[in-house]
Image: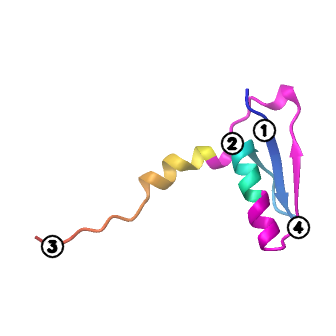
Amino acid sequence: MEPRFLVTVNDNPPVIMCEKHAQTFEKIMMVGQIPCTIYELDEGEEQKKCHACNLVGDIMDNQPRIILPN
């Protein structure tokens, strides 16, 4: 199973991310000079799903659609 990471910014609640999303998140925070904390979860906790990966379906379902007149 792919490693999972616990990611947090300031006093916000932590989020679980896969390695790909955690790396991207870290780069964004570095560019924005925003301090963040990333912990790798233990092997027993890896069954938890990445919150970012789980949002893809919701984002796709809620995308704005342009309806053009005929």
Do tag 3 and tag 1 residues touch (Cβ < 8 Å)? no
Image location of residue 41, percent across then percent down: 86, 37
Residue that label 1 marks: 4
Q: What residue do we see at 81% from left, 43% from top? A: 5
Label pair 4/2, CB-CB below 8 angstroms:
no
Classify mark 3: helix, strand or loop: loop
Q: Nearer the viewer, residue 40 or 67?
A: 40
Q: Look at mark 2 in the image and give the residue it sits on.
A: 50
CA–CA distance in space, label 3 to label 2: 40 Å
The mark that comes first in sequence, 4 or 1, is: 1
Image: magenta residue range: 26-52
Secondary structure beneath dot 1 equals strand
The reply to whether the magenta stretch includes residue 37 is yes
Residue topped by disc 3? 69
**1 is higher (above) or lower (below) than 40:** above
* Disc on res. 34: none
Label 2 vs 1, first from the N-terminus? 1
Q: Amino acid at mark 1?
A: Arg
What residue is disc 4 on?
35
Marks 4 and 1, how far apart in space?
A: 20 Å
Q: Residue at x 64, y 49 (%)?
A: 52
Mark 1 residue crowding within 10 angstroms, few (<14) / some (14–19) / many (20+):
many
Question: Label 3 vs label 1: CA separation?
Answer: 46 Å
Name the amino acid type tagged 4: Pro
Mark 3 and mark 1 lie on one chain; the one further toward the N terminus is: 1
Q: Quadrant of residue 66?
A: bottom left
Mark 4 vs 2, N-terminal side:
4
